[in-house]
Amino acid sequence: MLIELDKWYKIMAPRTTVLVSTVDAQGRTNAAPFSFVMPVSGKPPILAVAMAPTRHTLANIKETGDFVVNLPGEELLTQLMVCAKPLPRGSSEIKEAGLHEEKAKTVSSPRIRECFGWFECKLREIVDAGDHQIVLGDILQAEAAEQGSAPLLHIGGADFSLPGKVLKAGSK
Ligand SMILES: Cc1cc2nc3c(=O)[nH]c(=O)nc-3n(C[C@H](O)[C@H](O)[C@H](O)COP(=O)(O)O)c2cc1C
């Protein structure tokens, strides 16, 4: 079965979903979900997020040079979808969703308190790639909540899944 080429990634799912929080030059905060996310390097620690050029998140990162990648758990699904709403630039989806900002330790962008993992990132480079731009971030600080949670996995649209069966490869 051939797959329509502009939807090729639909079978490359589910994908880890993150909430990227940012701030603009005027100090206005923002958060949005992203699932085109990839770990890139361990040493130095680098991650990549592909963003459509219209995203306010991308504009903020270009202005301030930093961002926080927050990991939301299952209990934040509703809030995460509120953060996906196209609010006017400068309106904070974090507040709209009833989430709480916390000061990050190494960057100007805020962290989202309710998440279970936080990567504070400094912009390394932005690479043009088709209809997205790849934001490469140097992770300055990585932190996890004592009470871990499972990452939300994006299937597509409003569909998500959770990590399920653990399979061990190796001898029978
Ligand atoms: C689960 C989920 C994953 C998403 N992943 C991406 C993504 O990887 N890249 C992207 O550009 N937009 C993605 N979006 C769309 C943005 O989150 C959405 O357009 C949002 O309003 C952008 O907010 P902003 O303009 O404040 O940055 C995703 C949406 C959802 C619900």
Image (cartoon, rainbow, N blue to C red):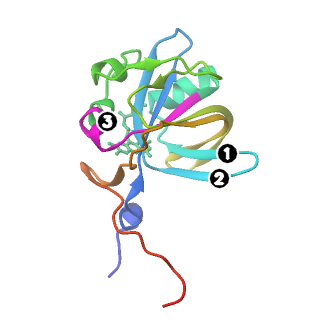
Observer-nearest residue: 146 or 15? Answer: 146
> Looking at the picture, how far across and down is residue 27, in whole percent?
51, 10
Identify the residue at the far bottom of this view.
Answer: 172
Real-space Cα separation, disc 2 to disc 3, in angstroms: 24 Å
- Mark 3 Cβ and ligand 1 under 8 Å apart: yes
Real-space Cα separation, disc 3 to disc 1, in angstroms: 24 Å
Rendered image quadrant of residue 84: top left
Which residue is label 2 attached to? Answer: 40
Identify the residue at the far front of this view.
Answer: 146
> Looking at the picture, how far across and down is residue 18, in whole percent?
44, 42
Badge 3 density bin: few <14, some 14–19, many ≥20, Cα 10 Å: many
Q: Disc 1 marks which amino acid?
A: Ile
Q: Disc 2 marks which amino acid?
A: Val
Q: Disc 3 marks which amino acid?
A: Leu
Identify the residue at the far top of this view.
Answer: 26
The residue lying at 41 percent from left, 15 percent from top is: 90
Location of residue 62 with respect to 24 vertically, above or below: below
